[in-house]
Image (cartoon, helix red, strand yellow):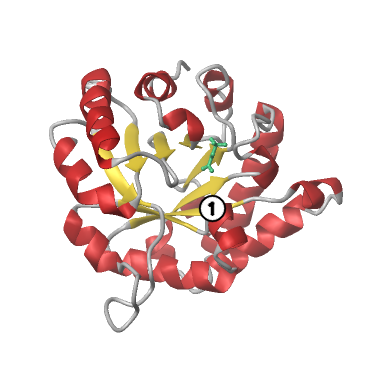
Amino acid sequence: MRRPLIAGNWKMFKTAEEAHVYAEELSRRVSGVENREILVCPPSVYIHPLVRAFADSPVMIGAQNVFWEDEGAYTGEVSAPMLRSLGARFCLIGHSERRQYFLETDATVNQRLKASLKAGLTPIVCVGETLKERQDNTTIERVSSQLTNGLKDVSTDDASRIVIAYEPVWAIGTGKTATPEIAQEVHGVIRSLLAGIFGAERAGLIRILYGGSVKPDNIDVLMAKEDIDGALVGGASLDAASFERIIRYRG
Ligand code: PGA
């Protein structure tokens, strides 16, 4: 019912030459992979070359951020129609690094989300609690407010086009993965929160990815969980061989 999605987030890594070599290698490694969607989100300067390099492979390309206006005097920004015109299909929104370093808020997440939907990009909305919030037992509160405010005024018709990524901030780049049980628990809560917003039927169609130190050796147990519909992979997506193993998870 929900097609698994394995997404790689390169963050700010790789030169143009490295991106090119990676694309050749990953295309070769994943040719013939079926029954799951594969996505790479490189720095935006590599979107166009990578769309071309992956043209004959199942790998799709996404952006790591998007601005909410279509065009205008906004030096340094890139809009959703621009990304779409380059061949990008997805867009990460509200990644914790953007919330932390670039003052992203739930309100701007909401603006970026609406702009993406309007332009035909599939938004991947990232939510997740900090270590302090987990220790204070406010995880659910935090994730709930990120979802309610981030998804504000999105129509029920658009709901199934949205992807959610649950990324506990304490698990990102730290080597500390949430256990499959912890991840499933929050994913289950996210699904019920989505049911509260869009109704149970629509919520059942929305993919919820797990992100935070996903590696070849933990992907299988994570994907075995009922409400984990895919992964958002940072560090381990930078190497084509380890990303291939994650894409080819067993289960
Ligand atoms: P990580 O990053 O896999 O390196 O922990 C995940 C992410 O930030 O999306």
Q: Residue 40: x percent and y percent?
A: 34, 40
Say which residue appears at 56% left-offset and 54% top-offset. Answer: 97
Q: Residue 118: x percent and y percent?
A: 31, 69
Q: Which residue is mark 1?
A: 126
Looking at the rendered structure, the kind of residue marked 1 is Cys
Is residue 166 found left or right of 114 in the rendered image?
right
Please name whichever residue, 238 or 183, is drawn nearer the observer in this view of the structure: 238
Say which residue appears at 51% left-offset and 67% top-offset. Answer: 109
SS for dot 1: strand
Residue 247 visible here? yes
Is residue 158 found left or right of 140 in the rendered image?
left
Q: Is residue 111 above or below residue 38?
A: below
Indicate if the residue with disc 1 has its beta carbon within 8 Å of ligand 1: yes
Residue 1 visible here? no
Please name whichever residue, 150 or 76, is drawn nearer the observer in this view of the structure: 76
Q: Is residue 130 above or below residue 179?
A: below
Q: How many marks?
A: 1
- Quarter holding residue 69: bottom left
Q: Which part of the image, by quadrant, shows the N terminus? A: top left
- Quarter holding residue 146: bottom right
Q: Residue 201: x percent and y percent?
A: 48, 51
Locate ligand 1 by image quadrant: top right
